């Protein structure tokens, strides 16, 4: 029983768990955003409003994909990214700092499309506003801890990286950043970190496109 307890307490400390956690978080973000953006785009094509069910006469009925993915992509994506981030434990490109910009800038493109296609000034205003809202946190956080945001705080083995310029607190910090370690990052660390993030993004986008098309 002692051995089982030890196994249960250390499975999260493996390199595989950290790598898979980072992969899962980026995959989940890409999948959720792809489903959400396709749903919003489909809704915009219907005139910006639709409904389904209820006692009233429905002028424009929502498609199956809009009904299925609009609410679930947001909540499911947030939950999955949270779980993946916990498992990654500081390894890999930090997903949360890019999730907010990716969401708002992507939504901004849909509103800007309505301006360029239909001359909708409201779409132009909302699009510019969403771009500003999306990029502001990135500009605040990235300069404060560029290595930690782009590489991660630890390598796949859990060893904290050394930093030429230690991370400093920024306006969105909940607490002071942990002290850097003594493990200098290597080229392979950068390749692994970016490779995992890019792989998760590609897989998530691909599945999101295929899944939405199969339901729509």
Image (tube, rainbow, N blue to C red):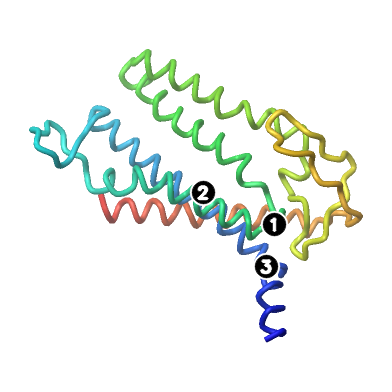
- Of the two numbered discs 2 and 3 in the rendering, the one whose residue sits closer to the viewer: 3
Side of 57 where 23 appears, left or right: right
What residue would you read off at disc 1?
89
Q: Estimate the x, y position of residue 36 in percent, counting from the top left.
A: 39, 42
The residue lying at 72 percent from left, 84 percent from top is 2
Q: Closest to the observer: 189 or 173?
A: 173
Mark carried by residue 12? 3
Q: Nearer the viewer, residue 87 or 200?
A: 87
Mark pair 3, 1: CA separation? 9 Å
Image height of 51 relative to 14, above or below: above
Labels 2 & 1 near each other (Cβ < 8 A): no
Q: Earlier in the sequence, mark 2 or mark 1?
A: 2
Pinpoint residue 159: horizontal percent, then vertical percent. 82, 60
Q: Which residue is mark 2?
A: 29
**Foreground label between 2 and 1:** 1
Are the residues tagged 3 and 1 within 8 Å (C-beta)? yes
**Mark-to-mark CA distance, 2 and 3:** 21 Å
- Assign a secondary structure to mark 2: helix
Considering only vertical position in the picture, is 50 above or below 185?
A: above
Picture quarter with the N terminus:
bottom right
Question: On the picture, is 48 further left or further right than 27?
Answer: left
């Amino acid at each position: 029983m002692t051995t089982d307890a030890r196994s249960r307490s250390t499975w999260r400390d493996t390199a595989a768990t950290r790598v898979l956690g980072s992969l899962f978080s980026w995959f989940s973000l890409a999948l959720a955003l792809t489903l959400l953006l396709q749903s919003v785009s489909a809704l915009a094509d219907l005139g910006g409003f639709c409904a389904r069910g209820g006692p009233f006469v429905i002028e424009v009925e929502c498609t199956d994909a809009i009904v299925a993915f609009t609410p679930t992509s947001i909540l499911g994506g947030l939950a999955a990214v949270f779980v993946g981030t916990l498992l990654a434990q500081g390894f890999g490109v930090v997903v949360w700092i890019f999730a907010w910009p990716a969401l708002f800038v992507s939504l901004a493109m849909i509103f800007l499309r309505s301006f360029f296609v239909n001359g909708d000034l409201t779409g132009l205003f909302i699009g510019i506003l969403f771009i500003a809202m999306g990029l502001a946190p990135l500009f605040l956080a990235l300069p404060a801890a560029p290595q930690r945001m782009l590489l991660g705080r630890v390598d796949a083995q859990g060893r904290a990286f050394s930093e030429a310029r230690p991370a400093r607190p920024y306006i969105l910090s909940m607490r002071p950043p942990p002290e850097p370690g003594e493990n200098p990052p290597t080229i392979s660390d950068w390749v692994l970190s970016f490779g995992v993030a890019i792989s998760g993004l590609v897989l998530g986008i691909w599945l999101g496109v295929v899944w939405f098309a199969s339901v729509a």
